[in-house]
Amino acid sequence: MKILFIGDIVGKIGRRIVKDKIQYYVEKYDIDFVIANGENATHGKGLNYNHYRELIDSGIDAITLGNHYDSKSEIRHYIDRVDRLIRPCNLIKPFPGEGSIIFDIDGITVRVVNILGSAFINEEVNNPYYAMLDILSEEEATITIVDYHGEATAEKMGFARAFDGKVSAVLGTHTHVQTSDARILPNGTAFISDVGMCGEYDSVLGFETESVVNKTVYGHESKFALHDQGKGLFSAVVIDIDDYSGLAKDIFSIYYVEED
């Protein structure tokens, strides 16, 4: 089975570039299942229902979240009414929705898990390692894809090594910068520290450059802004997984920048 995993979708430009490119890559690489991180899809922070539907209608089969899972309050009212949205599985505070969903793709079970890292993240979470052990003990699936939404590369790497051979892929999200360490670990788990983002290329992590510089460099009290139009960046990975063992055979990155 070939899976396309799309990095953090940021704002309107991110949603637009995904809609523009998803079918091209699905056909080019003969993709069977598409997953995307959508926690920044609505104005850069959170995911409302309309944008959830927009992404699903574009061809995405499952959407994961991250530390902004609750940034749009309406998610509490719709997450239990949809069946393709996965919030972090290791939240301490009660929250609706599921942190792991199993999909049946032509008789092959694909489990998608969303985990929130504990290093340098404000949200208090249960230990990611033990949360993953609990999920693996609940119900079997042939293929398990983990979206590890975390800040620290070492934390993501350590988690992937701990579950090497026990899950199909550990794919890092959250930092919005694609790393060059995509690989198959010794026991057959695909790994990358961060898949990257889909959003405005001429930006800081998808956000309007001046607003980020004013706040992070000069210390001004201002919110990060987003452009509605601009040159798009599409970041993703393709994972080729054995249908019987559930172990990865190949992983490679996609990094596409629109022309001016």
Image (tube, helix red, strand yellow):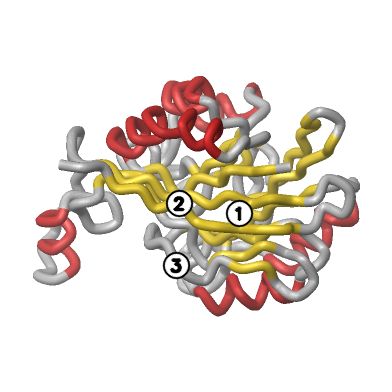
- Number of marks in the rendered image: 3
| Image coords of residue 27 (percent x, y) | 55, 31
Residue type at mark 1?
Answer: Asp
What residue does disc 3 label? Answer: 179
Residue type at mark 3?
Answer: Thr
Spatial CA distance of label 1 from label 2 is 17 Å
CB within 8 Å, label 1 to label 3: no
CB within 8 Å, label 1 to label 2: no
What residue does disc 2 label? Answer: 254
Residue at horizontal 62%, vertical 36%? 31
Label 3 neighbour load within 10 Å: few <14, some 14-19, many 20+:
some
Kindly state the secondary structure of the residue where label 2 is placed: strand
Label 2 neighbour load within 10 Å: few <14, some 14-19, many 20+:
some
Which of these two is toward me, 144 or 114? 144
Closer to the observer: label 1 or label 2?
2
Q: Residue furthest front?
A: 28
Kindly state the secondary structure of the residue where label 1 is placed: strand
Location of residue 258 with respect to 124 vertically, above or below: above
Closer to the observer: label 3 or label 2?
2
The circle on residue 147 is 1
Location of residue 50 with respect to 118 vertically, above or below: above
Residue at horizontal 42%, vertical 27%? 51
